[in-house]
Image (spheres, helix red, strand yellow):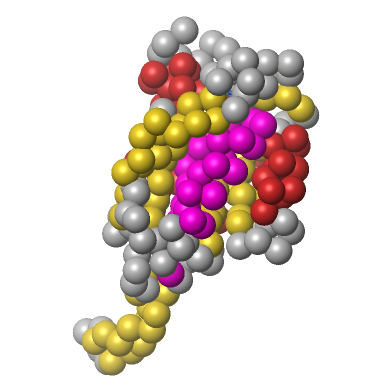
Amino acid sequence: MQLHVIDHPLVAHKLTVLRNVNTDSPTFRRLADELVTLLAYEATRGVRVESHEIMTPVSRTTGVRLSSPKPLVVPILRAGLGMLDGMTRLIPTAEVGFLGMIRDEETLQASTYANRLPEDLSGRQVFLLDPMLATGGTLAAAITFAFDRGATDVIAICLLAAPEGVAAVERRFGPEAPVTIVVAGMDERLNDHGYIVPGLGDAGDRLYGVV
Ligand code: URA
């Protein structure tokens, strides 16, 4: 498993505004969208391409195009939905699947309540979108879903992570697994309710204005 914590002043600036309790939902949504596009640039560094010959107005040349099967982008509902536009802006020909997962606030266990993913993900790179990597339970379940269907590698894009969640995912899949986590910020810890500290609160509520 690989972890990339993006070290960039624009990412840090946008993340700070996102964390602020006084940031309203429309601003939060816009910033989350912009942040994901910045993270997606790093997350797609290993996207598979194939050589492609074209004519410029001047001569023939060889470039690249995305290989088939196309990457699959999977927002984890509900909060991952707020990351979808930022991702598909950068990689518009990717296909999109959906995974609905909910965390029991008592036990902190994740369970699946909706699944619109192709049965066969053989040979595919899967990009999971989940803003908060907290206990790691939701992300680990989503990664298992993708591998069980044949995905070759999984790249998770998160806004914030807690060390406990990263460690849980690494324990579950091992250091050599084809799993990459790209995150805008690594926070201190989880609190007793499984919230990331200092964090940004409930990402779904902040995106969609439910308190
Ligand atoms: N989910 C959230 O939305 N926020 C957290 O801090 C942890 C999990």
On screen, residue 67 versus residue 154, left or right, reads left
Residue 113 percent coordinates (x, y): 40, 31
Residue 2 rendering spot, x and y as whole percentages: 68, 57
Choose between 10 and 160: the one closer to the eye: 160
Q: Is residue 155 toward the left or the right of residue 80 in the image?
A: right
| Residue 92, picture quadrant | bottom left
Up-down relation of residue 180 to residue 199 (above or below): below
| Residue at 60% from the left image edge and 49% from the top image edge | 182
Residue 20 in sight here: no
Q: In which quarter of the image is ligand 1?
A: top right
**Residue 45 horizontal side relative to residue 134, left or right:** left
Q: Where is residue 132 in the image (x, y as percent from the top left)?
A: 58, 32
Numbered label tally: 0
Up the image or down, 148 lies above or below 57; here it is above
Residue appearing at x 42%, y 11% in the figure: 210
Residue at the (34%, 69%) spot, across then down: 69
Q: Is residue 11 magenta?
A: no
Q: Which residue is drawn at 33% across and 83% down?
A: 52
Residue 45 or 57: which is nearer the viewer?
Answer: 45
User: In the picture shown, does residue 75 fall above or below 61?
Assistant: above
Residue 54, given in percent of the width and then of the height, sits at 26, 85
Magenta range is 123-148
Image quarter of the N terminus: bottom right
Q: Quick check: is 125 in the magenta stretch?
A: yes
Q: In the current view of this chain or complex, which residue is farthest to the bottom? A: 60
Tell me if I can see residue 79 in this picture.
yes
